[in-house]
Amino acid sequence: MKILMVGAGGIGGYFGAQLIRAGADVTFLLREQRKQLIDREGLTIETPSETFNLRVATVSAATLKPDYDLIVLAPKAYDLEDTLGSVAGAASRGFILPLLNGLDHMDVLDQRLGRDRVLGGVAHIAAMISPTGSVKRLSDLHMLTVGPRAPEQAATARAFHVWCERTPFDRAYSDNIEQSLWDKWVFLASLAAMTTLFHASVGKIVATPYGHALNLQTYDECCEVAARCGFPIADSVRAKASAQLTLAGSGFTASMLRDMASGQRTEHEHILGGMIRRGQQHGVACTLLKTAYTHIAVAQSS
């Protein structure tokens, strides 16, 4: 299996590097500046337990050919259009595995490339590019879930999962990947809404008189949207997520808060806006989500 990893950021860089260490045939499609750095110095991965450097195969959009069985997309949501332009030279064959948050991107990919070619994938990881250009994993969480959305995708999804099983990161194969996408999105939207609204960690929010209830109320809003869209969140998933969102002393925040605090563009339109739009279509008020969305939209416009 020949894999094209589009980007070498927190998601693409980390999971791509671990797959290469396991022996997988992975090439990185990179913008010119990032490509020059990695071609010169290699791809460095920092984790809580180790740091390693790999010499990796890279390619630019100008020289890209349709040589790949699987194209893994891991950009920020707002870079999706540019990413689709950059992979045009390879997108005429193979399957697509997007690792973006939310679901808006799935609609775009289905329309552009055909639903029968777009697998489902969920990345759980807190990682970033450091000032030196290395990919830094910030916590012990590093999990990748993959699954088919059409019968003809199953063989490729299984083959990719086999490679994932040879790596040190956690992995899962989902026969209901659409539900897996909703499970993550509902949790992430809740976490992003509350931690960006209050510029605080879960622990600081729940330490206030009303924070515990507000975190759960936000999660309930998102769960209601999922249920009305036909993807109800299972009780076991809700219990685990609720515990994480109300954990006393927790330093947990969404990456959206880090982006916001550093003055970078955020994915609020994709993660919060997409949830709100689906909620409105099904009569869910989404009051807290709208409050958080408006807070970020105002901050991003200034």
Image (tube, rainbow, N blue to C red):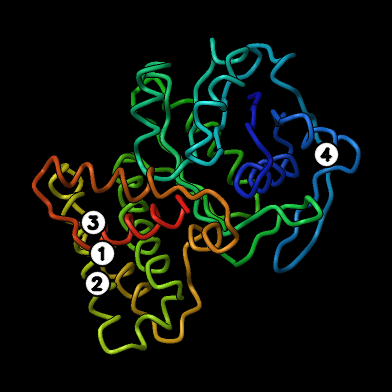
**Left-right relation of 119 to 12:** left
> What's the distance in space between the residues labelled 2 and 4, CA to CA?
43 Å
Kindly indicate whether the residue at mark 1 contacts the one at mark 3 (C-beta within 8 angstroms).
yes
Residue at the front extreme of this rendering: 302
| Residue beneath disc 1 | 219
| Residue beneath disc 2 | 216
Q: Which of marks 4 and 3 is nearer the N terminus?
A: 4
At mark 1, the secondary structure is helix
Q: Which mark is residue 222?
A: 3
Q: Which of marks 2 and 3 is nearer the N terminus?
A: 2
> What's the distance in space between the residues labelled 4 and 3, CA to CA?
40 Å
Q: Vertical placement of 8 versus 59: above or below?
A: below
At mark 3, the secondary structure is helix
Q: Which of marks 2 and 4 is nearer the N terminus?
A: 4
Q: Given the image, on which type of amino acid does mark 4 rest?
A: Ile
Task: From the viewer's side, name the closer residue of 55 and 270.
Answer: 270
Task: Give the quadrant of the N terminus.
Answer: top right
